[in-house]
Image (cartoon, rainbow, N blue to C red):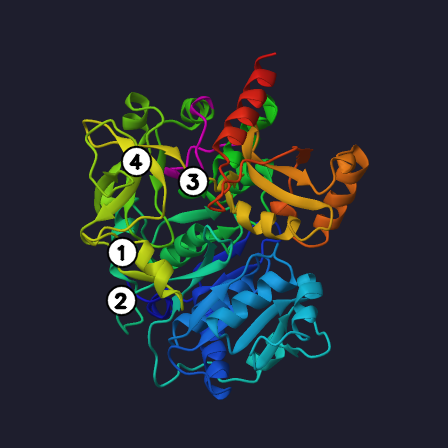
Amino acid sequence: MPHPSITAQTYPHKPAIIMGASGEMVTYRQLDERSNQGAQLFRSLGLKTGDHIGMMLENNRQFMEIVWAAQRCGLVFTPISTHLKKNETAYILQNCGAKLFIGSHLLSEVAEQLLQEDTGVEHYFMVGGIKPGFESWEEAIDAQPDTAIADESNGVPMLYSSGTTGQPKGIFVADYDKDVNAPPGAALIGAFFGFSDESVYLSPAPLYHAAPLHYNMMVIYNGGTTVIMEKFDPELALKLIEEHRVTHSQWVPIMFNRLLKLPEEVRNAYDVSSLQVAIHAAAPCPVEIKERMIAWWGEIIMEYYAASEGVGFTLIDSANWLTHKGSVGQALLGELHIVDEEGNELPVGETGTVYFGGGQAKFHYYDEPEKTADAYNDKGWATTGDVGYVDAEGYLYLTDRKNFTIISGGVNIYPQEVENVLASHDKVADVAVFGIPNEEFGEEVKAVVEPVNWADATDETAIEIMEWLRERISKLKMPRSLDFHPKLPRMDNGKLYKRHLVDEYRKQAENAKKE
């Protein structure tokens, strides 16, 4: 796959990016010129190949222009979730050693707070407006030439994912090479899904997530057109599929659920026959939801299982899923191994930790050698901690996700982060946070608190704690409810055994659903 600068020479007026709601369009020539100007600006500020930058932006055209500017001048770029608060964002910028940060005028509250933190960032820019302490991104690149820099090289993303300790971890996959053209993995996956220069891709999710970022870049490497939704809306998604004759799209299960909840007359009002492939991942999809989507859109739905670490990749199409319901597919990249707690490989049908071996890209957690080492076993196989089993035909079924990681609406929520904050409340002696079933989101966050004084186990105290917590963590991580418990199951070794609590509350949720 060639670099988009090549497509700009051949088809300069072809749309590279179309914003879904506004209809704003960026041609390949404009993307090439704008990314050149961004690369020129980065070099003028002294940023060199291998330096890091951070960005916190909503879905907009500038997001992708900045990504391509960083890509073509060898920078490591870190998109940051727009839901994070000041402390979470500052930690990421400090950890990755970002020399430059680009914020958004629409998200200026957190951006402005960063100026008071010792992040090590040297340059602050803002998209869409100006705030004290920030330079205008648009004005800065307008002043730069739109020719390519002399030392182009391949920049790569580094996204953050939290581990069991709750600290965000920068996931850095080994650099493929210094060539600015597409990495081999992207070319392989793109070819498998049938992406080409004729593809029109609908991107309904936030660009700071790994899959939307990588798929949008893959489409543009291929010379296709990407239609980016500023914010997901189910009816607008259908409208855009019809209007732009979308051929490919990528979803999470909650989006399927919301599409299906549209009135039947609304769903039937739009022509989705142009769709060739609808990809989904990021969270378990309820069997009933997937059955209904296949019945509506046809056998074009493909599911994969992977992680930002890039240790492996499984895939299943609709036809195979219908005969292996609940599976996430067979290995396309890497070899599947199911391993017990002692490190022994388990036979077919037995549940254990999912490992991939053979041929996967080597990754490391940035500046976290111990956590990196923990991800590999003595055979060189790698895991992200997911649990499952493989059937006799090699189809993988997941039975748990990263132990107690909560997956709500396709977003990973890490209980330890919430527990660490709650534990600092003066009325909290101990706390357990975990996921319980939620019909729409898959899972929701549940908090169970052991109070310092049992007399505080009241509705008023629960409201007080929740209001206090809301000021300290992002909305996505907030528990939907909080209960009190006289004594949480923490053992002498300091480990909190959540399994009994999780089983109890999940059973309650399932019984309530049946009633």
Label 2, secondary structure: give it.
loop
Instruction: Residue 358: say if magenta.
Output: no
CA–CA distance in space, label 4 to label 2: 31 Å
- Foreground mark, 3 or 2, reads 3
Image depth: mark 1 or mark 4 in front: 4
Nearer the observer, disc 3 or disc 1?
Answer: 3
Above or below residue 144? Residue 353 is above
Question: Which disc is residue 176 wearing?
Answer: 2
**Residue shown at 39% from the left, 65% from the top:** 368
Do the numbered discs 2 and 1 sit on residues whose CB atoms are within 8 Å?
A: yes
What is the residue that sits farthest to the top in this orientation? 515
Q: Quadrant of residue 351?
A: top left
Q: For the residues marked 3 and 2, what is the alpha-carbon distance in whole angstroms?
A: 31 Å
Residues rendered magenta in the picture: 268-288
Q: Earlier in the sequence, mark 1 or mark 4?
A: 1
Up the image or down, 265 lies above or below 422; here it is above
Residue closer to the observer: 152 or 132: 132
* Circle 4 residues within 10 Å: few <14, some 14–19, many ≥20: many
At label 3, counting other C-alpha atoms closer than 10 Å, the crowd grade (few under 14, some 14-19, many 20 or more) is some
Relative horizontal placement of residue 75, taking residue 414 as reference (left or right): left
Magenta stretch contains residue 279: yes
Q: Which residue is mark 3?
A: 403
Q: CA distance from mark 3 to mark 1?
A: 28 Å
Judging from the image, what secondary structure is the residue with disc 1 in? helix
Where residue 348 sits: x, y (%)? 20, 29
Q: Are marks 4 and 3 in contact (CB under 8 Å)?
A: no
Residue nearer the viewer, 21 or 115: 115
Tell me the kind of residue under disc 1: Gly
Which numbered disc, 4 or 2, marks the residue closer to the eye?
A: 4
Mark earlier in primary sequence (2, 1): 2
